[in-house]
Image (cartoon, rainbow, N blue to C red):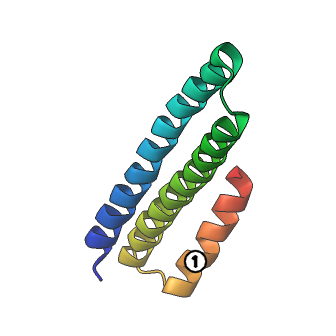
Amino acid sequence: MKTKSKLVILELIGGLFGWAWIIASLFVLYYIVMAVGFHGHWSKALLAFVIGAVSKWMAKGFKDNQQRVSFEADLIEKGYTPQEAGKMWISRYLKNG
């Protein structure tokens, strides 16, 4: 798979998880209002929160992966080996993390 297509796929999947996080966050607010004001179930709010948290985590993971692919492809284009590019990404990622 070419680098450009990998980046597009990672952006698409990360975006989908980002939207899932936004929608789940809105549902959390809705279910909290329903639980407090209208004697709704707290389990729905908790479930929406868990779905939102996992979606945010996945979106961040896909964004990090997209940055890694782009960074390593740039280094490989400049003449580094894939192993060297991977090591440079790890050192950079751990500094910023």
* Image coords of residue 53 (percent x, y): 64, 46
Residue at (39% x, 68% y) in the render: 74
Q: Residues within 10 Å of mark 1 (few under 14, many from 20)?
A: some
Q: Position of residue 7 (x, y in %)?
A: 34, 65
* Front residue of 74 and 79: 74
Residue at position x 65%, y 60% in the image = 93
Lateral position of residue 39 relative to residue 83, left or right = right
Q: For residue 6, what is the image quadrant?
A: bottom left
Taking the spot 63% from the left edge, 17% from the top edge, the residue there is 38
- Where is residue 2? Give x, y as percent: 28, 79
Q: Is residue 8 left or right of residue 66?
A: left
Residue occupying image coordinates x 46% and y 52%: 17
x%, y% of residue 84?
57, 81
Residue tagged by mark 1? 86
Badge 1 element: helix
Work out whether 57 lies above or below 23.
below
Identify the residue at the far top of this view. 37
* Count of numbered tags: 1
The quarter of the picture where the N terminus appears is bottom left
Left or right relative to 94: residue 11: left
Q: Is residue 82 above or below residue 25?
A: below
Amino acid type, mark 1: Gly
Q: Nearer the viewer, residue 87 or 80?
A: 87
- Of 16 and 6, the residue lying toward us: 16
